[in-house]
């Protein structure tokens, strides 16, 4: 099944879809034949319905996402090769990811791998999404088992599989680093693969935080840039290093040591007023978010839910500040919050998914503007005296926030 090992590129859902019917995709010399043109028209119609249904970038209706994926699959069944086909596959994956259809992702990717039309630009994304779907459906042990089996079958061509394995969340940071070290050793003769491997290791070191690890991440990133400055992991690592540096330094009045600007906003659950200065004596973590923001939801699931579970009774208060960007409303945020408060069930295990911390609504974005929020998720950690400890990208600050909370609130319960 896994006979090709390729480089990474990923298009956004509607960007990819727009390319399906662009002049460049059609070719300069001739228009598609009638049968192909009809399938292209069907894809464009499905795309337009999706755009019309989400004028503010909100959550796309499931039935329209499924219809868009089906239209692309219909095209691929007859025309599996070419630039338009590659964009159609990218669009299918984006639709399925938003539909949260892990079983269909697995079946779709396996079908593509069984053929011979998938391109180098598509392979990595499809591979990682497949194993992420296995993990979500059957747990990290199953995902790791399948990756390991594929690695053994692939023999020397397994660097991409190792990088996919390192992304399985069931592994600890040290285990992920060990897997990536194996990928680095195996990729010594291929510049692009080695750059991806070095930068992937740098990303994990940045997540762990600390001066020594950050310095090592910079060294690895410099080597990776010299090999392939445009590699996806290199770009991500550069962004994370920049975000972390900005977060630790702060800017203006929103900088470590400054008193956090006070505010009062309504709790979207109870409609009661929540005042920041009423939380003195607690460690407070502000999380600026929105329901349409994928990285915001990822931060909640992968970090904030665990932090709240372990430290809410030890002196930590997490407050989600819902922005009003893209027409977001308190009612919409409440509906989302009530749904997410239910635990995610995987097999017999209760895992993450509980988002029961305080959530307030910032209707005019005044608080977001006061705190200099230009992108989300944006986190501000405030000490017991009301002074800022960190302010910046939530994902870049995870390790630093956790370390500070552990120091101030004690170790998490088992």
Image (cartoon, rainbow, N blue to C red):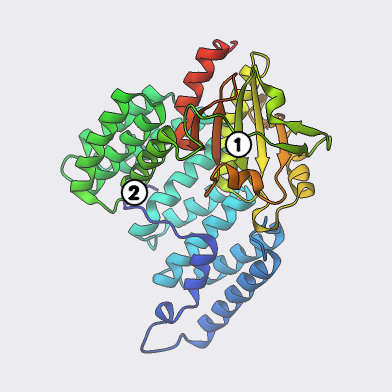
Q: Nearer the viewer, residue 156 or 376?
A: 376
- Where 198 sits versus 110, above or below? above
Secondary structure category for the residue under label 1: strand
Q: Nearer the viewer, residue 152 or 28?
A: 28
Q: Which mark is residue 375?
A: none
Q: Is residue 139 left or right of residue 52?
A: left
| Crowd tier of the residue under label 1, counting other residues whose Cα lies within 10 Å: few below 14, some 14–19, many 20 or above | many
Secondary structure category for the residue under label 2: helix
Residue shown at 37%/86% (left/top)? Answer: 28
x then y, percent, for residue 322: 68, 43
x then y, percent, for residue 78: 50, 73
Identify the image quadrant of residue 220: top left
Task: Judge depth for marks 2 and 1 and give the one in front.
Answer: 1
Identify the image quadrant of residue 222: top left
- Where 360 sits versus 79, above or below? above
Question: Disc 2 or 1, which lies upstream in sequence?
Answer: 2
Q: Is residue 162 left or right of residue 170?
A: left
Q: Is residue 153 left or right of residue 140?
A: left
Residue at the disc numbered 2? 235
Residue at the disc numbered 1? 287
Q: CA distance from mark 2 to mark 1?
A: 25 Å
Residue shown at 55%/36% (left/top)? Answer: 379
State which quarter of the image contains the C terminus: top right
Residue shown at 48%/50% (left/top)? Answer: 110
The reply to whether the C-beta atoms of the residues labelled 2 and 1 are less than 8 Å apart is: no
| Crowd tier of the residue under label 2, counting other residues whose Cα lies within 10 Å: few below 14, some 14–19, many 20 or above | some
Q: Is residue 347 left or right of residue 156?
A: right
Q: Residue furthest left?
A: 189
Identify the image quadrant of residue 200: top left
- On the question of residue 81 being in view, the answer is yes
- Where 128 sits versus 18, above or below? above
């Amino acid at each position: 099944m896994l006979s090709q090992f390729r480089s990474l590129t990923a298009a956004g859902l509607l960007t990819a879809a727009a390319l399906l019917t662009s002049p460049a995709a059609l070719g300069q010399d001739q228009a598609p034949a009638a049968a192909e043109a009809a399938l292209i028209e069907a894809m464009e119609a499905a795309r337009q319905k999706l755009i019309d249904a989400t004028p503010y970038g909100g959550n796309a209706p499931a039935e329209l996402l499924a219809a868009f994926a089906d239209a692309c699959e219909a095209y691929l069944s007859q025309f599996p090769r070419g630039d338009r086909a590659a964009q159609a596959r990218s669009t299918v994956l984006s639709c399925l990811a938003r539909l949260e259809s892990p079983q269909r992702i697995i079946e779709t990717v396996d079908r593509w791998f069984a053929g011979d039309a998938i391109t180098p630009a598509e392979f990595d994304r499809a591979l990682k999404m497949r194993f992420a779907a296995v993990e979500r459906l059957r747990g990290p042990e199953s995902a790791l088992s399948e990756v390991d089996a594929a690695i053994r079958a692939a023999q020397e061509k397994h660097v991409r599989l190792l990088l996919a394995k390192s992304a399985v969340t069931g592994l600890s940071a040290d285990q992920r680093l060990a897997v990536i070290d194996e990928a680095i050793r195996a990729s010594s003769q291929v510049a692009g693969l080695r750059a991806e491997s070095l930068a992937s290791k740098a990303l994990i070191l940045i997540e762990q935080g600390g001066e020594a690890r950050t310095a090592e991440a910079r060294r690895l990133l410099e080597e990776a840039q010299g090999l392939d400055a445009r590699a996806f992991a290199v770009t991500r690592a550069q962004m994370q290093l920049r975000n972390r540096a900005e977060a630790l330094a702060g800017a203006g009045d929103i900088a470590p040591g400054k008193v956090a600007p006070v505010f009062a906003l309504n709790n979207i659950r109870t409609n009661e007023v929540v005042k920041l200065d009423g939380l003195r004596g607690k460690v407070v973590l502000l999380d600026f978010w929105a329901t349409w923001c994928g990285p915001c939801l990822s931060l909640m699931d992968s970090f904030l839910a665990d932090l709240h579970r372990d430290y809410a009774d030890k002196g930590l208060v997490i407050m989600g500040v819902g922005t009003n960007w893209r027409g977001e409303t308190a009612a919409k945020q409440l509906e989302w919050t009530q749904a997410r408060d239910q635990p995610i069930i995987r097999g017999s295990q209760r895992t993450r998914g509980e988002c029961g911390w305080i959530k307030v609504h910032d209707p005019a974005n005044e608080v977001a503007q006061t705190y200099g929020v230009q992108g989300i998720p944006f986190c501000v950690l405030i000490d017991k005296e009301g002074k800022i400890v960190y302010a910046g990208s939530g994902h870049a600050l995870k390790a630093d926030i956790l370390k500070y909370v552990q120091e101030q609130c004690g170790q998490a319960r088992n």
